[in-house]
Image (spheres, rainbow, N blue to C red):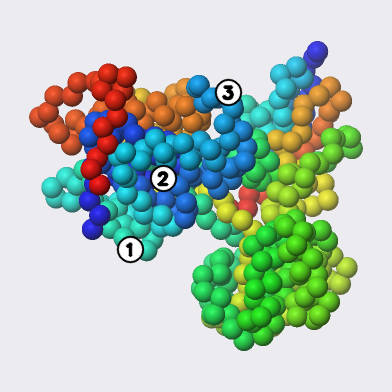
Amino acid sequence: MIKTDILIIGAGPTGLFAVFEAGLLKLKCHLIDALPQPGGQLSEIYPKKPIYDIPGYPSVLAGELVDNLMEQIKPFSPGFTLGERADTLEKTEDGQFVVTTSKGTKHMAPVVAIAGGLGSFEPRKPPIDNIDHFESNGVEYMVRDPEKFRDKKIILGGGGDSALDWAIYLADVAEEVTLVHRREKFRGALDSVEKVKQLSDEGRVELLTSAQVVGLKGNGHLDSVIIRHKEKGDITKEVDHFIPLFGLTPKLGPMANWGLEIEKNAIVVDTFDYQTNIPGVFAVGDINTYPGKLKLILCGFHEATLMCQSAYKIIYPDKKLSFKYTTVSGVKGFEE
Amino acid sequence: MSDIKLTVIDRDDKEHVLDAPTDMNFNLMEICKSYDLPVKATCGGMALCSTCHVYVLSNHELSEMSEDEEDMLDQAFFVQDNSRLGCQIRITEKLDGLKVKLAPEAD
């Protein structure tokens, strides 16, 4: 069991900055994020885009801002549980919260701060009616262990880097690799496109462009797919696995069942301290909503700052809290 | 500068005629959002999600697709020849009478 003062769900800019403000109050933080790296959408969606509305920075690349935040919070040595989605929130008898992740990691804290942004990033699922039915029964949204596909018949869907890279890799592992892509053109690194074309010429990867997987068949486990080709019409193909690789999309996910008041995919908070309808559970940044809400990083920073004041009073109800400027007190980190 | 009229057909096939100003540097996604139409606009208009995916039904000449938009539509579902991302359609006087339909939600 990981124990901390404030358990932050979401390691985007707001969650990261919360660590700093909490640290100034000598509160320890631990962050959980479904993505394998900190930074949230800044790292995942637009690391190379400049942001122009961070006070004091005429322009900063999203990726740089994340690096700077990581540097800024270093003295407070936050803990991280990355690549795991926060799945359940329970309250213990002594008023602590226990959050368990998709991989079963348990975290305990008196205060939970949800800084979940747009939700957790999950693979985009193609709109095929019975796709849920075949999940882990032949349909995989990511390649965790390529060995699973040794000597199997594989269909990959998509035209980006991950589809191309796995087609190249699996050509040596699987019995048969087919890459199905909706268009003629591939985005993704030119090298990879060339390599896949070469493998296709050698007959080691079957390339089906202007085509989409539209149907899945099988009794329990997937055994064939229907591919709709622009000119050739529907083709049925025997396969062991279908791996659709269409990028990630954010979803509110299991959090929607935590008993939080939700309005239009966002968590309703009180603007006094950004606390939710569950006392001790706060929501800051893009995931919350209140009258006048703007989804801006700088607003998330503000919300996280005020939230920490209330968090302190929950954790130390009998201690006095006096506000100090960093210009006066400096930043005193924690001993490792 | 004057307002133009746009027609947006929602996912229940209901037609909405919207007034859109041409002097505010708006895009179609922003207009839809300001009328509370069900456009999520997850990425906020950076052509980085496809939640503002629309089908263009009228014959207006639109700006050419950027590589970003093309890439994003490439990962989207329910894509047709007349698919565009609303956030990449800048509202100008030339678009008076534009008619679009919201594409189905993929999630």
Circle 3 residue = A58
Q: Earlier in the sequence, mark 3 or mark 1?
A: 3
Secondary structure beneath disc 3? loop
- Asked if A130 appears above or below A246 in the picture, the reply is below
Q: Earlier in the sequence, mark 1 or mark 2?
A: 2
Q: Earlier in the sequence, mark 3 or mark 2?
A: 2
Kind of residue sitting beneath label 3: Pro
* Same chain assignment for discs 1 and 2: yes
Residue A328 lies, in percent from the top left, at 27, 18
In the image, taking residue A313 as reference, residue A145 lies left or right, namely right
Residue situated in front as seen by the camera: B71 or A223: B71
Give me the disc on residue A283: none
Chain to which the residue tagged by mark 3 belongs = A
Circle 2 residue = A10
Residue B92 visible to the viewer: yes
Residue B66 lies, in percent from the top left, at 79, 41
Residue drawn at point x = 14 percent, y = 50 percent: A93
Secondary structure beneath disc 1? loop
On the image, which quarter does residue A28 sit in? top left
On the image, which quarter does residue A189 sit in? bottom right
Residue situated in front as seen by the camera: A25 or B34: A25
Chain to which the residue tagged by mark 2 belongs = A
Badge 1: how crowded within 10 Å, few (<14), some, or many (20+)? few
Give me the disc on residue A104: 1
Residue drawn at point x = 68 percent, y = 78 percent: A171
Residue A277 visible to the viewer: no
Q: Which mark lies nearer to you, 3 or 1?
A: 3
